[in-house]
Amino acid sequence: MNALSVTTRPDDRLPRYQQLRDDLVSRIAAGEWAPEEAIATEAELGQFYNVSTGTVRKAIDLLVVDGVLTRSQGKGTFVRRPRFDSSLFRFFRFKSRTGEPVRPTARVLKREVVKPGEEIRAKLGMKASEKAIHLSRVRLIEGQAVLSEEIWLPRARFEPLASLALEDFEDLLYPLYERLCRQIVASATEILNVEQATADDEALLGVPLGSPVILVHRVASDFAGTPFEWRSTRGGAATFQYEVEIR
Amino acid sequence: MNALSVTTRPDDRLPRYQQLRDDLVSRIAAGEWAPEEAIATEAELGQFYNVSTGTVRKAIDLLVVDGVLTRSQGKGTFVRRPRFDSSLFRFFRFKSRTGEPVRPTARVLKREVVKPGEEIRAKLGMKASEKAIHLSRVRLIEGQAVLSEEIWLPRARFEPLASLALEDFEDLLYPLYERLCRQIVASATEILNVEQATADDEALLGVPLGSPVILVHRVASDFAGTPFEWRSTRGGAATFQYEVEIR
DNA sequence: AAGTGGTCTAGACCACTAA
DNA sequence: TAGTGGTCTAGACCACTTA
């Protein structure tokens, strides 16, 4: 298993297919294979990493579920250009009034690196001295702002985002977290409230003062259950539905 | 592969692990293994269906992803019991005066056995001639109605509820479904909207006419994915929060 | 110690794609 | 026809649970 750790230090306690998966993510993130391009074949990867094809397949399975790769029988395995329906985006729960899922664009309005308030500090399990990255952004449909978001991230885990140009933030943040910061959202808890539109809402979203506004607070966590993103989203209640599947 | 088709006719064009998955779903839905009970071991299943353990594992993988089964190393593979008996308790957090969560009671106001409207008929996958049981109930906290619910059930599967005395309906319906009708809720989809209070809402829930009301539509399904309950719940937006964990 | 699921191997053959 | 991913086998050994 010496061939692993092409770009990172692997954790030998993890199963090989996990290590392999992580290494493939690194190579994709490093641009070794561009989007829409075929990666090495399963046989080649098996030889290169000195594992059986079954193990290679299991690693690729994970990345297919994550929406990073797609397979095409007879053609190859391809790096996927991010798509809305991928599982990375399963946390988006708003639908249009007609019931169709909507994919808004996004624009970051402001970024600051500051000490967070006590509530957010506690929710993210941060030390008192730690700083956080705070993003304010709007999400737009056909140029119209429909959601406003406040996002808080512990600086230590998201350092690359402290210096990324605001224009380079993408519509979807979670793929960005994974690619630039190696932070993967595994679960989230959301609490939904209905409030009345404030003057800020009126200015930013164009909803009438006092009209109902849906407010979603989300805490997102990694696979270990450690929270690392706090997010609050506001949007006019008339515009959206919120859908959830329970098991 | 003769042992397949224990309960259904398989499609031989499908891969074996798919056929196996479908057959396991049938057996679970038929009650061969109760919730919280371990199913046959991988080795036993492999012998029974005459496939290798790798194929059995792949079929079980699918059901784990679907949330039907959970694995536990060293113990076995278990039919998952969704904790729906506390569904509202879990997903609606009432703001009592002290701020503690409260458990609402319930009272059935009306029951009728009628042909459902087209929308509900379609959502429940019922035939045009079939009748449905329609329940109207309120949920109360300290004697005050806070939620009003409309519930539709296909009569064929819920016959015992057509004659049960209204006083004998319990606060939580899903345990009743399981005990009296052997219907187990395996998953549900909820869609949440915000509307304005109608005159009915004002009369029933005591919320001001025109104030924001949260409206939740739920379709609940069995292990085979067949929907068998349609429910709509209304409550004043000021009364509660809606909380959900996403995995 | 026995039994379970978890990982992994070293192949096989099939279905599909492209040259 | 050659090469790809898709399916499947018949094992092996490991980690964990229970008795």
Image (tube, coloured by chain):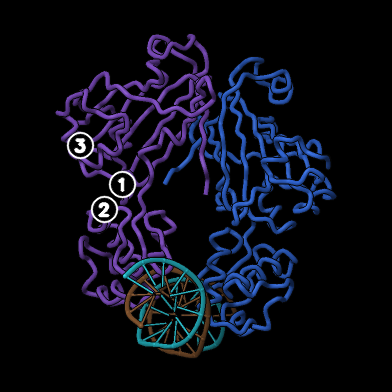
Chain colours: A blue, B purple, C brown, D cyan
To which chain does the residue with label 1 belong?
B
Amino acid bearing label 3: Phe
Tell me the CA gap for discs 1 and 3: 13 Å
Secondary structure at badge 2 equals helix
Q: Chain of mark 3?
A: B
Image check: A43 left or right of B83?
Answer: right
Q: Amino acid at mark 2?
A: Ala
Could you say which disc has been placed on residue B222 in the image? 1
- Disc marking residue B29: 2
Q: Do discs 1 and 3 share a chain?
A: yes
Labels 2 and 1 within one chain: yes
Residue occupied by mark 3:
B158
x and y percentages locating residue B168 in the rendered image:
21, 27
Badge 3 local density, few (<14 within 10 Å), some, or many (20+)? Answer: some
Q: Is residue B138 left or right of residue A39?
A: left
Q: Residues within 10 Å of mark 1 (few under 14, many from 20)?
A: some
Image marks 1 and 3: residues in contact by CB distance under 8 Å: no
Q: Are marks 2 and 3 in contact (CB under 8 Å)?
A: no
Q: Is residue A61 above or below residue A126?
A: below
Residue B247 image point, x, y percent: 52, 49
Q: Quadrant of the N terminus of chain A?
A: bottom right
Please state the horizontal and vertical placement of residue B94, each as a whole percent of the image: 48, 26
| Amino acid type of the residue that numbered disc 1 sits on in the rendered structure | Asp
